[in-house]
Amino acid sequence: MEEGPLTGSYVRDVRVMVYDGKMHPVDSNDISFKIAGMMAFKQAFTRADPQLLEPIYDLEVVVPEELMGEVMTDLQARRSIIQGMEARGAYQVIKAKTPLAELDRYTTTLRSITQGRANFSTSFAEYAPVPYDVQQKLMADYNEQVEEVHG
Amino acid sequence: MKVFDAKHIKNIVLLGAAKSGKTTLAETMLYEAGLINRRGTVENQNTVSDYHEVEHERGNSVYATTMHTEWRDYKINIIDTPGLDDFIGEIISSIRVADTCVLLINAQHGIEVGTELIWNYADRYQKPVILAINQLDHPKSNFDATLDSIKNRFGSAATLMQYPVNQGDNFNSIIDLLKMTMYKFPPNGGKPEKLPIPDDQKEKAEALHNELVEKAAENDETLMELYFEKGSLDEDEMRQGLKIGMMNHEVFPIFCMSAKNNMGSGRMMGFIDNVAPTSVEMKPEPSENGEVMPHGANDPTSLFIFKTLVEPNLGKMSFFKVISGSIEVGTELVNHQTGQSERLNQLFIMDGKNRNPVEKLVVGDIGATLKLKSTETNHTLKDKSVSLAVKPIQFPGPRIRTAIVAENKQDDEKLGEVLKKIHQEDPTVEVDYSRELKQLILSCQGELHLAMVKWALENTYGLHIDFVTPRIPYRETIRRAAEASYRHKKQSGGAGQFGEVYLKIEPFHEGMDEPTGFNIRNKDETDLPWGGKLVF
Ligand SMILES: Nc1nc2c(ncn2[C@@H]2O[C@H](COP(=O)(O)OP(=O)(O)O)[C@@H](O)[C@H]2O)c(=O)[nH]1
Ligand SMILES: [Mg+2]
């Protein structure tokens, strides 16, 4: 399942049980069953309360104390969950979990809100469900894209 | 080229925020020693260090550049680095092979954000550090404020060696607290007159001199006893104490200068000659697995490749430091990482783009060679009898990622290859084709770094590209069970197709019960490469 029905992304954590099938004595062959299976899977998937998951990253921002407020406000606007803060010399270290989708060009923003005085690093943490409204939007975008391709 | 032995080779790296004057200082150090007979400037795009076209276009350094100068009986290898942390890869590898870091501080601004960011890396390696307060001729320079910011940041390790008698437009005199002399420079800089300390400065100079003596004495018990007995230390004793302090990363001597007006750099070079440690005095390089690399002049040869540069008309140039023994032209060595043998047919000492051919380089020295087959940055080349490899430089992980596409589809394949070359030169540029996202993903250190990659692709390799937002690798799953069936039928003309399938799907989790109500004929569990499971 390389292309899921929602957005064309990989599918995971699904058990599929094929419990019946009908053949035709002459015309049935492998490809026929593959196509039928694929279509049945897509139908079942949309009925099974599908959920999109997104990659979440651990984010560590090192920032001078007096600029912490700006950085926190920006992080919250990026759907981040703040995990904690600690002092490191004259700096504060903010730890957060942030969706990858919200980290696009974070360097640029961080530089401009801190005049270049902060630094950060990221590493992959986990997959988590996408909020409902975001999922609706992503699915709509994907459908539009698919329609464009198929004319 | 004169051959220097290991005791007369000093390796320094020039570090500091953008525009603090590193490239100008390198030029001045070469000029002062007579290695070049006219000084280029960054504005005129004719410095030895900033020789790449992109550096001329931008007006600042992008690459770390190696040069050398000779001062009295010593050779000083100088690595000039960029000041922006987008190019941190170049900075880190230079720090790694240097034995003393010269951290420039702009007297207009004191410690800057850029100083801090770079300092964090210098500090990590615990290398000896010299602080150079530059631009004291600038009308906006403020020595006292700069010194305060230094003391604030570095505490008592910051050790004043000199102070300016005047600053701004009139800057021409420095009082040296070790030699207790005043240096007065002619209007165009260069060799200063040595004068007695003027009366109105005597009291201040004496007090600061005593502080310096105490600082020198506190690093060594013998010196402390001497100081206790005599109440003072002579010049050589002070040098010895300062050297110990520097090697312990506990004394950071402060020098005063104007790189632009060629005032003060000679005195600092003299100090580097006499006090800064050589490679052979430093703690030996660690090996990959935490052992100690051979490091003697008579040990079998090993070289550490710290930088690779692909010059369009020259090919691949590898920069190395001699870790043990010595290397002569024509020697064959083994690459520890690839197992391949490499013959070093040419050896150079580099001064920017100028290659000075040499026959031999000894332990502690830095040089370059051309056309190695399988050797890349972080590899060790060694004599067969050496079993260890130098611990590789750890480059920081990427901070920015983007998808990259060739404007012209036919260039796709070439783009992949060229990016691989760029990665060889700069390990902080990472490239990866994501099958999942169906995009070529480029990761690096920042916007400016990205802009440089684009510049190189366009100007060096003639490839036009666009950066596009990378797709996000979402996953799709379900939260409840559902059933469906589908009949596929195509029986008009030719071989027909017919198949009908009934299936049920449900959320899968590890350790769930086997399905009931079915006869299981066949079970197929697949671990998905992207995490999670598919069970049939
Ligand atoms: N007034 C003054 N300007 C300087 C001095 N050193 C460098 N500059 C100027 O500062 C700018 C940046 O110098 P550069 O050597 O490129 O700095 P880098 O970025 O640290 O390599 C150039 O315009 C230089 O001419 C100095 O000692 N005094
Ligand atoms: Mg420069």
Image (tube, coloured by chain):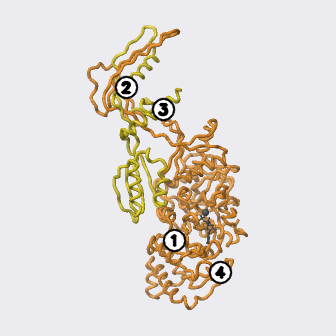
Name the residue rendered at 69%, 55% in the picture: B346
Neighbour class for label 4 at 10 Å: few (<14), some, many (≥20)? many
Q: What residue occupies the far right of the structure in this picture?
A: B37
Query: Which chain's residue wears label 4?
Result: B
Distance from disc 2 to disc 3, alpha carbons, whole Å, reads 34 Å
Task: Give the foreground label among 2 and 4.
Answer: 4
Q: Secondary structure at mark 3?
A: helix
Q: Is residue B231 left or right of residue B89?
A: left
**Disc 3 target residue:** A144
Task: Give the foreground label among 2 and 3.
Answer: 3
Query: Which chain's residue wears label 2?
Result: B
Q: Is residue A125 left or right of residue B141?
A: left
In the figure, residue B185 lies in which quadrant?
Answer: bottom right
| Residues at discs 1 and 3 both on one chain | no
Distance from disc 2 to disc 1, alpha carbons, whole Å, reads 67 Å
For the residue marked with disc 1, what is the amino acid? Answer: Gly
Task: Give the foreground label among 1 and 4.
Answer: 1
Residue B259's mark?
A: none
Q: Secondary structure at mark 4?
A: loop
For the residue marked with disc 2, what is the amino acid? Answer: Asp
Distance from disc 1 to disc 4, alpha carbons, whole Å, reads 24 Å
Residue B110's mark?
A: 1
Q: What residue occupies the far bottom of the structure in this picture?
A: B199
**Viewer-proximal residue among B479 and A114:** A114
Colour seen for chain B: orange
Where B221 falls versus B446 (above or below)? below
**Disc 4 target residue:** B185
Task: Give the foreground label among 2 and 1.
Answer: 1
**Disc 2 target residue:** B524
Which quadrant of the rendered structure holds the C terminus of chain B? Answer: top left
Query: Which chain's residue wears label 1?
Result: B
